[in-house]
Image (cartoon, rainbow, N blue to C red):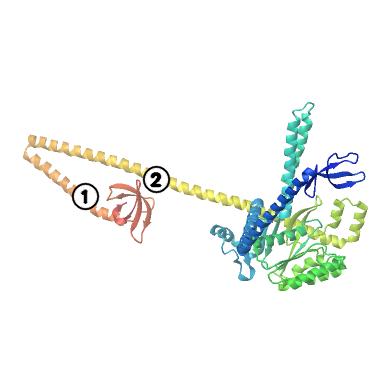
Amino acid sequence: MRTVDGRWCITSGSDQRVGLEGLLLFSGSGMGSIVEPLPAVALNDELQRARASVTKAENDILFKITKKMQEGLQCIENTFSIIVRLDTINARAQYSLSYGGTYPELYFPHDKGKSVAADVMLEDRTSITSHPSLEEWTLYLPKSYHPLLLQKHRESLNNAMKHARNATSEIRRKQQREGFTREKSNLDIFSLEMEVAEIKNTPPVPVDIFIARNTKVLVITGPNTGGKTISLKTVGLAAMMAKSGLYVLASEPVKIPWFDCVLADIGDEQSLSQSLSTFSGHLKQITNIQSCSTSMSLVLLDEVGAGTNPLEGAALGMSLLESFADASSLLTLATTHHGELKTLKYSNEGFENACMEFDEVNLKPTYKILWGIPGRSNAINIAERLGMPKAILDDAREIYGTANAEINEVILDMERFKHKSHEQVHEAQHYLELSRELYEKVLIARKRIIEHGIEQRYRKMEEISRLEAAARSELHRKARQFRASRRQLSERYSDAFGKETSKTLETESFEATRDENAGKSLKPQVLAEKRAMLPKVGDMVQVLSLGKKALVLKVDSSRGEVVIQAGNMRLKLKASDVVT
């Protein structure tokens, strides 16, 4: 059975005959025949009519839907536009959450650093403005990454982890079979786990891009395969990501100017269709960049002056970069191998040098940027690492010349000095942090010692006051006993010796009473003198209104007030209300 133009038919082979009546639709020599049986003709016709009805119904429905869409076409287009914008915003957020990064501070360079992010949340504005040192930088990108390098590293790590999981699952399935070798399987799993660990421990190397406000052109030099071009692309992508609403793949804080456009000449512009060589392609691209760049543009130039005679290329590159420094663009980053371009820094304040670090011991680039130092190409060293014959390398070094070798030696010494100074700065910062922590701990310990001393003094004064009160109470009790015994003795003498002796005792009693009254009359005077003396912080004083001792916490001599601590109460009183 088969269908021909939607009609069910019967097919037969070339060596078979169809033993039924019907319509012969096809027949060929050696190919068999196709027959539509007569009983099926009416059914096929009905099926065709049903299909036509279905098609007509579908067309009617589509027509009605189209008509309704035409009535609300403007609303549908607006909704679709909003959905696209929301989807784009969601994609930016998902990417930023997935890869992390930092919220960048965008600013207009000609508005004295005024931030673009006027509607940022308060906590975000606080985190941005908490770095006053950023004002001295035009571009600040600490530990920045190229997005594609991070993506490639993540994909490699995910693939390695996936292979490890699959291998583990496969080994578990094989464990149920006979003849399974556990040692070999453990070795395979261990090798896969080592591969995963190696990928985790070798992430992409971040680059630090710090460009000062007075710098207009940054000249990056260094060895081939050292990371110069990747650094250019990282800066360009960071600027575009910041303008697009994406987090920048760098550490905090990040400061990027609002570039109106990013213009780049990166890669080989050779074109056979336009009869352009590599050098001509670069010149045409740079000419277009010069005509389009403004005082708000970012210009990225890779291998300036390459592809032609070195002397002419260097002269052209120097003139070109000086034209960009003269307000042709806001910021220009250029890579080169021409040594003459490194000298522009010493004749023009708008230039700055940087180089890609090269490990002289292992003959490998470290992909880190060294600032303020002109780099070396290290072409001969790289050729040695790649296995070029020693005889060729020796001839190349001899041809290169002693003078250039001496210059490179000076540059090498500068790099070593720079590296050593960076290590010393990091060490100094480390010890500075330690000293700050120790200083804070000392302040805390000092505060605790003072509080403990005050507490101990307060306790001792309370104990002394308690003992004083007990002694005074005992003295009063003894005095009462003495007076009582004296009265009894007076009465006895009065009875035994008569009135004369009684008068003598009365005289003595009168004098004692007079002395006591004199002491009482002097007491207010003493109190007044004590009140006139202002206590000191930490003194124990007698609060007249409370009738108890208290510790002085604060003294205001100008207003004649003191703050005291009496038990759980802290009071502010007049100095006249307390007695020292």
Determine whether label 2 and label 1 are within 8 Å by CB: no
Q: Which mark is on residue 519? A: 1
Task: Look at discs 2 and 1 and give the one toward the viewer.
Answer: 2
In this view, the residue farthest toward the left is: 499
Q: Amino acid at mark 1?
A: Gly
Say left or right for 568 vs 521.
Answer: right
- Residue 34: quarter of image: top right
- Residue 535: quarter of image: bottom left
Q: Position of residue 384 (x, y in %)?
A: 87, 52
Q: Position of residue 69 (x, y in %)?
A: 63, 61
Q: Amino acid at mark 2?
A: Arg
- Quarter of the figure with the N terminus: top right
Secondary element type, mark 2: helix
Secondary element type, mark 1: helix
Say left or right for 246 vs 179.
Answer: left
Q: Position of residue 317 (x, y in %)?
A: 80, 69
Q: Mark 2 sits on what residue?
A: 457
- Residue 531: quarter of image: bottom left
Name which residue lies at 7% across and 35% down: 495
Name which residue lies at 21% across and 49% down: 519
